Image (cartoon, rainbow, N blue to C red):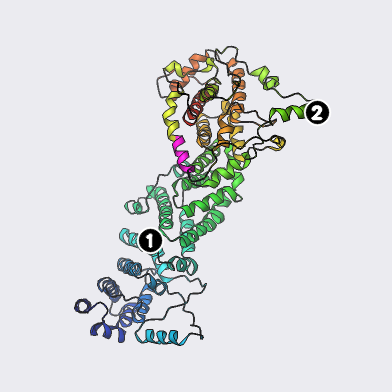
Amino acid sequence: MLDILVYEEKQQAVEDTGACMEYLLQHKLLETLCTLGKAQYPPGMSQQVLLFFSKLLSQVQKPLLQLVNVYRPVQKLICLCALPGSQTEKEEAQFLLVVCSRVKQDPHTLRYVLQLPDQPVSSTLSSDQSESSMQASSRGTDPPLPCGPIQSESCLLRALLGLTKSQSTSVCLKAHESLLLLCGLQAGFSGELLSTHTQLGELLAVRLQDLYSLLPMEDAAELQSWPHTPWSSQFSHLSTDPSSQSVGHMINFFCWLDFLDHLMRQAPQVLSVKLAVCVHQLWLVELLQPQLLDTCEQVVLGSTSVLCATVRLVQSSSLLDQLVHFLLRSDAAQPLLRRCDHISDQISMVSLCLVEELLQKPHRDVLDVLVLSFLHTQSYLSPPASAQEERQTESGEDSEDPEDDPFFSDSLTFSDSPHPPPPPPPGPQTADDVINSFLCLVPVQVRSSQLLQEGGYETYVHDAHTLVTECQALSLSWDWPLTPPPLSLSSGKDSASFFEGHLLKVLFDRLGRLLEQPYELNLQLTAVLSRLSAFSHPLLHEYLLNPYIHLSQSSRSLFSVLIRVMGELMQRIQQVSNLSERLLNTRRALLGLPHDPGLDHLTLLKGVIVLEEFCKELAAIAFVKLPQDQD
């Protein structure tokens, strides 16, 4: 019968319907086949019916799915797919793939295969509209179906979601490909149909929930560093080995996440946004947020690790919007930032990693909400000299000089260093002034890089250039100003209420304790600060990389925090004998070179080395960002 129909079509013009096809439609042979397949009469009939429908829809070129005597049996057959205990998954997956392929060719047939509920046609139809409806019925086609805001769990979507769980690689792959075909339809109404009239978003997000619940949260480090896993790669990792069960759960979750991300990038905007909103609500808010706010450290560590990997891996703009909204504006936002300074070093590490991943995403809100919204008033600056002197004259107060601070006078002594931090030079500062200010922060007696013939800040210039280029590429479309706003006479009046923001607060607090923190934590902390410093916004540059700004009372900057750390350093090194030798030995150990074992003051010595390298890195970033003198 199939051969006859295909042969007949080849003999006819495209717009003509042959006698055999007319007979098949008028006598509802497809309905009969569907009934026999459902009844399994004779045994094995369902497999043959699925094969026939697949071949009919793929080999006959004439559009068929808009014909009522075709799409109704197709609908019935779809509802028989992916049922529990099915023995015909292979044929079902092929049939559904063919159906979705035909829908891609004729997007207007989407409403038929989705089985959206019909709504009665208005009784106020014009005579022309009524006549066209009657003509459509006589041809075996349906008139256009007005779609209302009714959501239905389509048999097609249910079947495809069910087949994505199949143990058969080919079946699972075809189910994924079918979903991509449906969601990739670019016809104007397709995205609206799928987003408004089906539960596609909810079904996909619930699957993400289920896979997330199977993750081994005790493997937090592996979850956090999980590499990009293309969704199709899962079919080469199917294994029944019990020892790989936890790895299999991670593969399944991250492959499904990649599939959703890929799907949202291909889908029409209205559908992409709907899917992302469903992931936000059903996974991030309902499942992940309670775990992030849990009192159990293991739960917090595992959930934050997954979130960190998710931010790194997501590329869809719709899903990134929802992630950023969740991380910056939900109930979990402040706890996540505060955990950068958590009592658990592991939680602090993963929280800092999460911040660093966020800073690498092309989303303007990240810096606006975390940093720039707190700096835009420039309340960290002291007012211009004339206004400041006038107020001091009126109040009888003297200006505050850092040298009068007992902390600096008692603990910060550079008398043994031939290169003390220079005072602010008169007039505009050059790039060399800024670079030297950071380099000279480190007293010569605690410098150790030259003991291993390591270079100065020049060794960081290449990496700094790469970092600055990355940050500039991210912010290129954000219309940032080129220079800071002019400082008005009223600047500094609100200095008492200046708050650097939750992020910079925890970063500066952590930096102030750099000499007593684990080496790995310090590396992650300085990586975040370096990335922030590499951005080209003038306020960020001023606040983080300008050593010569006049800070208002009770305000601090990156440079002022580093000065205080140096003051504490000068006190602590008095307790370390053979300082240069110990620093050299520690540096050799960090580089994996032969060294003498020693545990005394190890955290302090590693902190000193991180501090020296961080100052060189900041100098290199300033070198790349600032215009250089021609000589």
**Which dot marks residue 180?**
1
Q: From the viewer's side, name the closer residue of 275 and 309.
A: 275
> Residue 196 location in percent, x, y?
50, 68
Quarter holding the N terminus?
A: bottom left
Three-letter code for the amino acid on which mark 2 is drawn = Ser
Q: Is residue 238 visible?
A: no
Three-letter code for the amino acid on which mark 1 is drawn = Leu
> Residue 525 location in percent, x, y?
53, 33
Whether residue 470 is in magenta: the answer is yes
**Which dot marks residue 335?**
none
> Residue 488 location in percent, x, y?
67, 35
For label 1, the SS is helix
Q: Main secondary structure of the magenta part?
A: helix
User: Could you tell me how far apart the alpha carbons at marks 1 and 2 are, in whole angstroms?
Assistant: 71 Å
- Please say if 179 is above or below 41: above
Indicate the quadrant where residue 366 lies. Answer: top right
Q: Is residue 126 visible?
A: yes
What residue is drawn where x is 61% and y is 44%? 335
* Of callouts 1 and 2, the N-terminal one: 1
What span is in magenta? 467-476
> Residue 616 location in percent, x, y?
49, 25
